[in-house]
Image (cartoon, coloured by chain):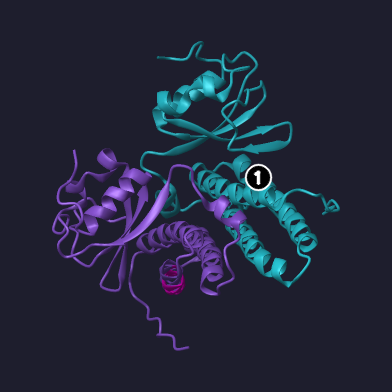
Chain colours: A purple, B cyan
Amino acid sequence: MAFEKIEYKPIPVRELLREMKNLSELMIDLAYSAALFNDRELAEDVLELEKRIDTLAYQLEMVTMIAARDAEDAEALVGVSKVASAADKISDAAADIAAIVIRNIGVHPIVSEIFERVEEHLIKVKVHEESVIVGKTINELDLAPRMGVDIIALYRKNDWIINPKAEEKIQAGDVLIARGTSEGLKELMALCEGKLDKLED
Amino acid sequence: MAFEKIEYKPIPVRELLREMKNLSELMIDLAYSAALFNDRELAEDVLELEKRIDTLAYQLEMVTMIAARDAEDAEALVGVSKVASAADKISDAAADIAAIVIRNIGVHPIVSEIFERVEEHLIKVKVHEESVIVGKTINELDLAPRMGVDIIALYRKNDWIINPKAEEKIQAGDVLIARGTSEGLKELMALCEGKLDKLED
């Protein structure tokens, strides 16, 4: 197994920590969904994200080392480092759950039942070229108030955008991870797949 | 440090696993809040819950051992065991965050910023004897639709009730953990403390 060298990059601690926290929470959701739907591809995404969190953890460690110039700085920053390692543990837990799917252990009905949320579900859907949502911003889709759906992440050109901003424009080929009511998710799926030609009112 | 002997109890795997999952998620929320508000008491609750998860993990391990009578059972149940250990890791991560507060490391502004949710907050509040909500069921309080507030856990007589049912009656002395809009939480707090005499419309 080959690993890339992790180089120091002057990324602000704030950004690194926020991404680690958001990613780790997303991973738990994805891992639950992967187990619930026995979705191997989603499980592989979780393992992919776990590698990314590891990289972020190394970077954050280097950035805090450089930022701390005296004892006072070090005391202030050690808490940041602990929170980062907590996010790392959460992502490990998500990877463990994903591994159940990858290793074909089989998802016990008890596990499915535990992960099933009464009202909330998660989908992963690719945006087809002919979809009406291509070129629209997330804001324009008006998903949350209209359909009870949130786009929590999107995968574009081998990169994850977590909690995409309202001004983010959807591109053909984007893979969306959305959370919401079953009705709303069905509509979003139809929109993404080009099976629905206009946003319903 | 004295630990109680953990005895085998014939609790269904389903119940143990559900409680572990729910508790671990609650702990993450509580740990974030403890860090955000530098709330030592809340942080101690997180560590208390971590012990409970450990106990549940032992019990679940024993119950699955006894339930598995042949290779097929064992293969079906190993996934359950992995999910339980993932919940355990999540609870460890929560405990790490709580430890920042307990050990007076100090919560760095970056950490507060990361944990701050834009619209959602968490409170912990004790129900006073003279509060109008004593004796009412959670359903009667009508918190979610009326105030945008959910009671996610309550602490009663040294025991946690996670995701209390709609029919659960509030008792004087209960400690509620609630999540919701700041407005709604302010109202709930005033109600619990007996500073507000009736449910607003």
What's the magenta bit mostly, secondary-structure-wise?
Answer: helix
The chain carrying label 1 is: B
Q: Residue B183: x percent and y percent?
A: 40, 27
Q: Residue B126: x percent and y percent?
A: 61, 27
Q: Quadrant of residue B148?
A: top left
Relative to A150, B187 lies left or right: right
Q: Which of B169 and A10 is in front in this view?
A: B169
> On the rendered image, what quadrant is the C terminus of chain B found in?
top left
Residue B2 appears in the figure: no
What's drawn in magenta, residue-wise?
A46-58
- Residue displayed at 41% across by 26% down: B145
As helix, strand or loop, the secondary structure at mark 1 comes to: helix
Q: Mark 1 points at which residue?
A: B44
- Residue displayed at 73% across by 31% down: B157
> On the rendered image, what quadrant is the N terminus of chain B found in?
bottom right
Q: Residue B76: x percent and y percent?
A: 65, 65
- Residue displayed at 62% across by 49% down: B18
Relative to A95, B64 lies left or right: right
Please, what is the three-letter code of the amino acid marked with disc 1? Glu
Q: Residue A163: x percent and y percent?
A: 32, 55
- Residue displayed at 27% across by 48% down: A187
Residue A47 lies in the magenta-colored region:
yes
Relative to B6, B46 lies left or right: left
